[in-house]
Image (cartoon, rainbow, N blue to C red):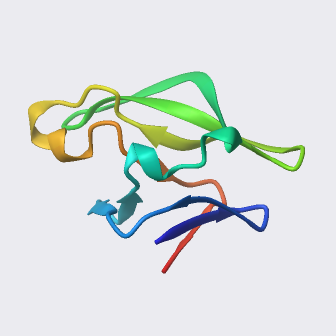
Amino acid sequence: MKAIWNNTVIAESDQTLVIENNHYFPPNSIKKEFFKESNTQTNCPWKGVASYYSIDVDGKQNNDAAWYYPETKHAAKDIEGYVAFWKGVEVVE
């Protein structure tokens, strides 16, 4: 699977996990040079508190376009630290 934004592959892995129709990419599969920590957090009742990244590619920024759970609740341990995308980031095979 590939995550693409602004015509650039920002993550790539054949080890994604699909939860609630979202592909979660292993932390080592993202191209960290495109990711900037965000202060945004949200809460999921069964996964825990999500943190966000903004994506910056060729001077264009997509705020809070990726999220991950640094510490999950027990039911979501498989995706702890894994990264998922939205806000126009294409995830394709």
Q: Is residue 44 visible?
A: yes
Name the residue at 29% across, 63% down. 18
Query: Total label count?
Result: 0
Q: Is residue 63 visible?
A: no
Name the residue at 47% across, 24% down. 41
Outermost residue on the right side: it is: 59
Q: Position of residue 28 (x, y in %)?
A: 43, 46
Q: Position of residue 11 (x, y in %)?
A: 55, 57
Name the residue at 34% across, 62% down. 16
Name the residue at 27% across, 26% down. 71
Outermost residue on the left side: it is: 74
Q: Position of residue 49 (x, y in %)?
A: 34, 26
Q: Position of residue 8 (x, y in %)?
A: 73, 63
The image quarter in which residue 69 lies: top left
Outermost residue on the front side: it is: 28
Q: Nearer the viewer, residue 83 or 39?
A: 83
Q: Is 31 situated above or below 23?
A: above
Q: Is 24 situated above or below 48?
A: below
Q: Is 39 situated above or below 8?
A: above
Outermost residue on the bottom side: it is: 93
Relative to 12, 31 lies left or right: right
The image quarter in which residue 7 lies: bottom right
Relative to 93, 33 lies left or right: right
Q: Nearer the viewer, residue 77 or 45?
A: 77
